[in-house]
C-alpha cells in the first residue's frame, strides 16, 4: 500500500515497525501469558511520540495525521494487540475527547502529560447494564456548590487500573437519558475514585480491563468536559475516532496471521512437499490477503476523511466492522493452516485468534456497526 502514503508516513511506519520488532515482539507472548501490563513499553512509546501522534505540538502531540496514527497502531498490534489497544484507547478516546471538546485550559493542563506518556488516560462509558445501550447508564453527577459529586460504577475500562486521568460519563438529568448525560475529567487521586474488579479475559491479557467505582467522588466544577447534558455527543464523536484505532488494531492482528501462515506453509512438509504447494492452502492465503487489503483500504479512507475534517461516522463504522471480522477470519485460517500446532501455545496464531475476537465487540459491536451504516443510508 506504499503508493497511498507520503514519505513522512512511510518513515513513521518503518520507525514504529522497528520499535515493535525490537521492543514489543520479544516480550509479547510472555506478557500475554502472565497478564503483565507493558508499562516500560508504553513509557518508551510515549518518548517516541506515539501516544499523541495526531495531536498538535502546542499540546504535546507529534503534529502528524490520522493516517500516520493508523499505521502506527497496526504495526504495534502486529507485534502485540494488547499494546495496540492500550495506546488506541488512550489516544483516540481519552486524549481525543479532551482535544475535541475541552477548554483551552483543560487542553493545556492534561494533554501534554497524556501525549508524552507521563500519564495514561481511560474512557469510562460502559456499565454493567449499559453496553451497546449507553443511554442506560446509572452513574450520576450532581452539582453541589463549586463541585460535581459523582456516584456509580463503570465496567470493562481499558487501562482502568493504570490510568491517571479518566473521562467519566454520568447522568446530570436522569429522566432525559441520552440527552441528560454529561462528561467529566476525573483524576485518579480524587477521593472516592476507586479501582474495582480486574477482569480475567480470553485475549488481550496484557491490557488491564478494570471496574471503576465512584463513591461521593467530588471534582472541581471546571472539570466538566464540554457542555452540561451534551456528553452523549462527546461519547459518540470520540468513539468515531476510536473505531479507526480498533480497525487498525484488527489490521495488525490480521497481518500477523497472514505473515505467520505464509511462513509456516512454506516450511511445513507433508506428502513430501511444502504444504504451500497445495491448492487448498493457496486459496486460504489468497482469501486472507484479499480480505486484509479491503479492510486496510476502508480504514485508510476513514483516516483520510478525519484528517480532512469530513464527516466519517459511517466510514469509521465500515472500517471497524470489516477489519474486526477480517481479523477473526485471518486468525481462524492461520490456525487451520498450522493444523494441530496452531491450537497450541507453541505458535502465536492461537493468541491472534483470542485477541481478534474482542475487536468485534468493544467500541461498538459488529451489530451496532451495521445499525450505524444502515441508519446513515436510510436517512439519505
Image (tube, rainbow, N blue to C red):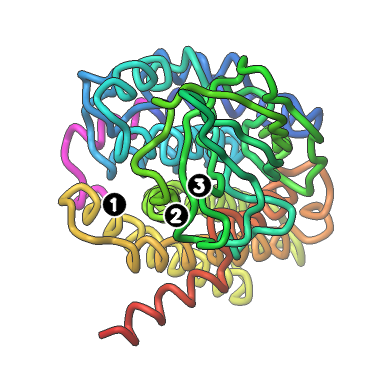
Tell me the quadrant of the picture where the C terminus can be found: bottom left
Residue at (55%, 49%) from the top-left corner? 171
Q: How far from the left and from the top, in percent, is residue 265?
A: 63, 57
The crowd level at tag 1 (other Cα within 10 Å; few <14, some 14-19, many 20+) is many
Contact (CB < 8 A) between labels 2 and 1?
Answer: no
Helix, strand or loop under label 2: helix
- Between the residue at mark 3 and the residue at mark 2, the CA separation in whole angstroms equals 25 Å
Q: Residue at x 50, y 47 (%)?
A: 249
Q: What's the distance in space between the residues labelled 3 and 1, CA to CA? A: 14 Å
State the residue position of label 3. Answer: 249
Circle nearer the N terminus (2, 1): 2
Mark 3 burial class by Cα count in 10 Å: few <14, some 14-19, many 20+: many
Contact? badges 3 and 2 (CB < 8 Å): no
Q: Which mark is residue 295?
A: none
Q: Nearer the N terminus, badge 3 or badge 2?
A: 2
**Residue 378's spot in the image, x, y percent?**
34, 87
> Residue most toward the front?
145
The front one of 95 and 284 is 95
Q: Which mark is residue 303?
A: 1
Are the residues flagged by discs 3 and 1 in contact, CB closer than 8 Å? Answer: no
Magenta residues, dominant SS class: helix
In this picture, is 143 found above or below 178? above
Residue named by callout 2: 232
Please report the bounds of the magenta region as a residue range.
1-15
Q: Is residue 73 left or right of residue 155?
A: left
Q: Which of the marked residues, 3 or 1, is nearer the chain's N terminus?
A: 3
For residue 366, which quarter of the picture?
Answer: bottom right
Where is residue 151, by image quadrant?
Answer: top right
Q: Name the one closer to the observer, 181 or 279.
A: 181
Amino acid at each position: 500500500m506504499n503508493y497511498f502514503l507520503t514519505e513522512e508516513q512511510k518513515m513513521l511506519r518503518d520507525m514504529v515497525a522497528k520499535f515493535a520488532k525490537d521492543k514489543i515482539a520479544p516480550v509479547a507472548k510472555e506478557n500475554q501469558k502472565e497478564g503483565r501490563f507493558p508499562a516500560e513499553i508504553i513509557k518508551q512509546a510515549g518518548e517516541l511520540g506515539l501516544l499523541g501522534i495526531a495531536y498538535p505540538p502546542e499540546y504535546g502531540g507529534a503534529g502528524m495525521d490520522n493516517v500516520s496514527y493508523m499505521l502506527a497502531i497496526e504495526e504495534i498490534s502486529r507485534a502485540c494487540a494488547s499494546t495496540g489497544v492500550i495506546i488506541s484507547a488512550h489516544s483516540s478516546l481519552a486524549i481525543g475527547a479532551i482535544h475535541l471538546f475541552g477548554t483551552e485550559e483543560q487542553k493545556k493542563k492534561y494533554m501534554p502529560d497524556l501525549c508524552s506518556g507521563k500519564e495514561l488516560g481511560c474512557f469510562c462509558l460502559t456499565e454493567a447494564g449499559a453496553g451497546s445501550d449507553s443511554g442506560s447508564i446509572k452513574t450520576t453527577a450532581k452539582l453541589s456548590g463549586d463541585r460535581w459529586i459523582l456516584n456509580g460504577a463503570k465496567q470493562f475500562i481499558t487501562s482502568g487500573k493504570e490510568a491517571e486521568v479518566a473521562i467519566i460519563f454520568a447522568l446530570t438529568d436522569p429522566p432525559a437519558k441520552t440527552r441528560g448525560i454529561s462528561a467529566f475529567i476525573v483524576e485518579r487521586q480524587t477521593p472516592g475514585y476507586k479501582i474495582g474488579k480486574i477482569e480475567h479475559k480470553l485475549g488481550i491479557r496484557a491490557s488491564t480491563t478494570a471496574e471503576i467505582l465512584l463513591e461521593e467522588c467530588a471534582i472541581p466544577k471546571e472539570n466538566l468536559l464540554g457542555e452540561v447534558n451534551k456528553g452523549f455527543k462527546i461519547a459518540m464523536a470520540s468513539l468515531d475516532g476510536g473505531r479507526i484505532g480498533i480497525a487498525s488494531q484488527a489490521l495488525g492482528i490480521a497481518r500477523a496471521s497472514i505473515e505467520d501462515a505464509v511462513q509456516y506453509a512454506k516450511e511445513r512438509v507433508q506428502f513430501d512437499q511444502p504444504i504451500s504447494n497445495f491448492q487448498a492452502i493457496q486459496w486460504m492465503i489468497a482469501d486472507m490477503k484479499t480480505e486484509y487489503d479491503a479492510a486496510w483500504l476502508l480504514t485508510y479512507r476513514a483516516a483520510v476523511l478525519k484528517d480532512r475534517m469530513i464527516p466519517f461516522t459511517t466510514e469509521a463504522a465500515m472500517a471497524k466492522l470489516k477489519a474486526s471480522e477480517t481479523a477473526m477470519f485471518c486468525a481462524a485460517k492461520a490456525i487451520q493452516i498450522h493444523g494441530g500446532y496452531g491450537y497450541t501455545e507453541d505458535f502465536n496464531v492461537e493468541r491472534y485468534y483470542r485477541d481478534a475476537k474482542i475487536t468485534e465487540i468493544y467500541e461498538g459491536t459488529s451489530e451496532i456497526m451495521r445499525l450505524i451504516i444502515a441508519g446513515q443510508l436510510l436517512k439519505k
